């Protein structure tokens, strides 16, 4: 097997941590010696062993790592966080060669892990590939803000509701399940005040068990007008209300209020970046979508199209703020989900 073959084993292992690593990246590791795979590890959950250490713990004998090759999808860390530096463990184990998928974009690590290994006479090979594992993590550190995904369901004539102020159920089971996966992939979900009032959503992940569910965020304007009996507030999990005004002190334990004079999309994203939120799913509604599009703060759009026509005065998708010119994206995926169509597009 080639280096690329062993790395694919590490990539496959990394995906096992999907949805559980929170702000940490997905990472897989494979230890090979004399063309034999000795151990495979991955980062199971935020706060637990990193992939390299997980692989080392799988060895039958500690000395088996001596003179072996370690394949790891992301540069080993060299700093103390929730876990000690992986590079120290790798060197101490006697690993003689490390093949790395990509340099870690986190400035706490970026290049430092590679330098440590070289300084300790460990041969390093950098493949320079991310394998699609950590798109939001990479984006966050490269752009210093969260990756923003717009998500909505609409009819064939582009309507999200039959009439403004009424909720409409558009898509079938397969699209619903896919949208649940989309929530898992994002660390925060945002809706506007109108969506909260009309839809009374939960915004929870119900098809997967998560130790760190996405933070549910509402643009609420006046916190004093919030009804804490609504579904969003009664279910476990953190809720952040971004408001212009608040005098109340009867907050549920899971609710935090953040007050600014005006919560523009740019201010929301700056705030989330400071909170180390790497990915945001903007779920609704139509006017909130339009505000983010108008601000040029949409990196990805996921649209579910139901084979229905509402016609009349139904509420259009992304309706409100007028653009000076069309916002052009590139369609990256088209998929049939039961009776519905899923289209994914990304900024060019």
Image: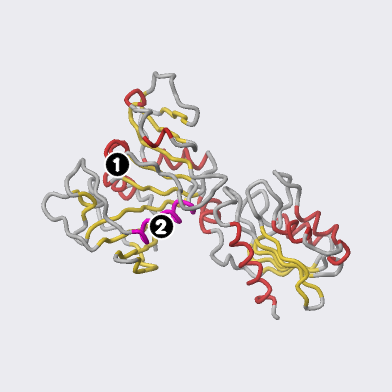
Q: Quadrant of residue 231?
A: top left
The secondary structure that dominates the magenta segment is helix
Q: Is residue 77 left or right of residue 190?
A: right
Check residue 152 for magenta coloring: no
Residue named by callout 2: 177
Whether residue 66 sits left or right of residue 327 in the image: it is right
80 is higher (above) or lower (below) than 129: above
Q: Residue at x 39, y 37 (%)?
A: 232
The residue lying toward the viewer, choosing from 195 and 246, is: 195
Q: Residue furthest bottom?
A: 1
Q: Residue at x 62, y 62 (%)?
A: 14
* 246 w.r.t. 11: above or below: above
Q: Residues within 10 Å of mark 1 (few under 14, many from 20)?
A: some
- Residue interval drawn in magenta: 173-185
Q: Secondary structure at mark 1?
A: helix
* Residue 322 locus on image (x, y percent): 23, 48
What is the x, y in percent for residue 167? 24, 45
Q: Is residue 250 above or below residue 25?
A: above
Q: Position of residue 161 (x, y in %)?
A: 21, 49
Residue identified by numbered label 1: 199
Q: Quadrant of the C terminus?
A: bottom left
Sequence order check, earlier mark of 1 and 2: 2
Residue drawn 54% across the image and 53% down it: 19
**How many residues crowd mark 2 within 10 Å: few (<14), some (14–19), many (20+)?**
some
**Residue drawn 33% across the image and 30% down it:** 221
In the structure shown, which secondary structural element does the residue marked by tag 2 occupy?
helix
Q: CA distance from mark 1 to mark 2?
A: 18 Å
**Count of number-bearing discs:** 2
- 268 displayed left or right of 225: right
Instruction: Report x, y in % for residue 122.
Output: 81, 65
């Amino acid at each position: 097997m080639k280096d690329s073959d062993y790395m694919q084993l590490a990539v496959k292992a990394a995906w096992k941590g999907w949805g559980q690593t929170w702000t940490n990246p997905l990472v897989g590791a494979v230890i090979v010696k004399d063309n034999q795979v000795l151990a495979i590890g991955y980062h199971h959950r935020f706060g637990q062993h990193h992939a390299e250490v997980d692989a080392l713990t799988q060895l039958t004998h500690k000395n088996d790592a001596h003179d072996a090759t370690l394949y790891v999808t992301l540069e080993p860390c060299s700093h103390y966080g929730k876990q000690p530096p992986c590079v120290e463990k790798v060197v101490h184990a006697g690993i003689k060669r490390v093949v790395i998928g990509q340099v870690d974009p986190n400035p706490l690590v970026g290049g430092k892990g590679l330098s440590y290994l070289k300084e300790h006479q460990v041969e390093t090979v950098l493949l320079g590939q991310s394998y699609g594992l950590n798109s939001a993590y990479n984006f966050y550190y490269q752009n210093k803000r969260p990756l923003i995904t717009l998500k909505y369901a609409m009819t064939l004539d582009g309507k999200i509701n039959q009439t403004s102020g009424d909720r409409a159920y558009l898509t079938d089971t397969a699209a619903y399940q896919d949208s649940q996966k989309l929530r898992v992939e994002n660390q925060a979900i945002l809706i506007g005040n109108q969506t909260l009032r009309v839809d009374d959503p939960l915004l929870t992940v119900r098809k997967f068990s998560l130790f760190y569910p996405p933070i549910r965020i509402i643009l609420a304007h006046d916190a004093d007008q919030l009804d804490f009996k609504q579904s969003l507030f009664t279910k476990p999990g953190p809720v952040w209300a971004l408001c212009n005004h608040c005098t109340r002190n009867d907050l549920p334990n899971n609710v935090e209020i953040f007050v600014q004079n005006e919560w523009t999309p740019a201010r929301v994203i700056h705030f989330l970046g400071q909170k180390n939120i790497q990915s945001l799913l903007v779920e609704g509604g139509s006017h909130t979508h339009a505000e983010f599009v108008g601000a040029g703060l949409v990196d990805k759009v996921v649209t579910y199209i139901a084979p229905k026509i509402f016609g009349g005065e139904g509420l259009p998708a992304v309706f409100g703020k007028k653009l000076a010119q069309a916002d052009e994206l590139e369609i990256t995926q088209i998929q049939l989900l039961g009776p519905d169509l899923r289209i994914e597009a990304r900024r060019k």
